[in-house]
Image: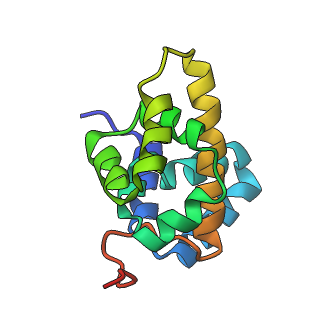
Amino acid sequence: MKFNGFDEALKILQNLMPEEQKKIISGIKKTQPDLAIELEKSLITVEDLKYLTEKMLSEFLRDIDLAELGLVLRIASEEVKNHLFSMLSKNLKQEVEESLKGAPVPMKKVQECHDRIMKIVRHKVENGALVLDPKSSDKLV
């Protein structure tokens, strides 16, 4: 069995509270800034969007380009796509699907869109506007 320190560190961080994650990553930044950046990027992924509530999705959609979301969903699981589409209006769904099912684009463009959207997601999580935790009690009822 091969040991991957990055993956193990990521698993440990994922099981901590956000405040604890920030504290540890801040310490790592002092000696290994590149590692800290990669850990931050890996803590929240496109797959975490399946934890958005309707209210959070509505807030999130105000800050992103729907065509870019469609491109990013090309690399997301069916579970994430289904979850998001189940909460979108017919018009918004159609706009996202146009990009999702549109002509092929270079992977570099998809990655650029992914990076922009995930930067927004990370910012909103840090500010408390989004809660992407499957165990969270912040679910709307």
Q: Position of residue 121 (x, y in %)?
A: 58, 57
User: In the current view of this chain or complex, which residue is farthest to the left?
Assistant: 1
Question: Quick one: which residue is furthest to the front in this view?
Answer: 91
Q: Quadrant of the N terminus?
A: top left
Point 48% across, 63% down: residue: 57
The residue that appears at 48% across and 40% down in the rendered structure is 96
Query: Toward the viewer: 40 or 105?
Result: 105
Q: Quadrant of the C terminus?
A: bottom left
Q: From this view, report whether residue 105 is shown above or below residue 4.
A: above
Q: Taking 90 as reference, is 130 above or below it?
A: below
Q: Does the rendering let one see residue 126?
A: yes
Relative horizontal placement of residue 55, taking residue 106 as reference (left or right): left
Q: Is residue 1 above or below residue 23?
A: above
Quick one: 44 or 78, which is closer to the camera?
Answer: 78
Quarter of the view holding residue 108: top right
Can I make out residue 35 in this image? no
